[in-house]
Image (spheres, grey):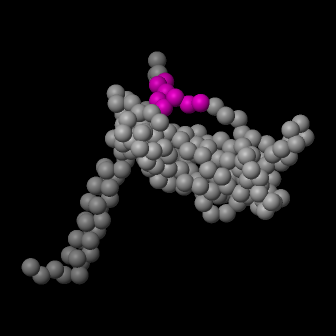
Amino acid sequence: LQFTRLDMESSNALLMLLLSAVLRTAFSAHFEGAIIHWRPAAVQQSSGIAVEISHRVTWKRSNVFCDDTTINSLVLLASGSLDCQEGCSGTVGSMSFFCTDYGTTDNWSTGGRSYNYTFASGVTQFEALYAGGDWIDALVQGRDSNWEVRVKGDLSIRPDTNSINSSPVTGMLPIVRVQHGC
């Protein structure tokens, strides 16, 4: 067979289209939600402001598999990073997590992780972002769309505690069902 230049370009375009369709099918609709909170780290650094950042994240179990063996082996799951937007630089930390729970009926895996990040002395505000695509496909609106989880913090010293501020902490169920159009 002989291919002309146009045929090769068309073949490459078709290959890219097929590859993106396969990858979209393989990795789509997997993120279900996350919570990020922060507080002063137990040990402060002399070179800056040390903060402990904690997160809980939930993924579709068929994409990020977890079972009792995974939980007991303490394997880090998933990937991605919490990236600085303001008051810091680069990657604040990894969003991989230790699985703590899973649901076979509703197809979810969830877990958390904590790590320290040291902000430069004098920083009073920060913002970091965890973002991706393919929000869960079970949503009535917004399915398969891009998502982002932001954390914003005020590192000012509180006069009542003489320590830097902390974020509020709340729990989250792995799956929250809300009736729509009732």
Residue 78 in the image: state x and y as whole percent.
Answer: 44, 50
Identify which residue is drawn at 73% across, 53% down: 50
Q: Residue at x 16, y 80 (%)?
A: 3
Residue 131 as seen in the image, left or right of residue 115: left
Tell me where residue 163 appears, x and y as whole percent: 83, 44
Q: Quadrant of residue 109?
A: top left
Is 139 included in the stretch rendered in magenta?
Answer: no
Viewer-proximal residue, 85 or 65? 65
Q: Residue furthest right?
A: 159
Q: Where does residue 12 sit, x and y in percent of width and height? A: 26, 71
Helix, strand or loop for the magenta stretch, by majority: loop
Q: Residue at x 47, y 25 (%)?
A: 177
Q: Is residue 62 left or right of residue 175?
A: left
The magenta stretch spans which residues?
171-178
| Frontmost residue, 13 versus 171 | 171
User: Is 68 in front, or is 172?
Assistant: 68
Report x, y in % for residue 144: 42, 44
Q: Could you tell me which quadrant the N terminus lies in?
A: bottom left
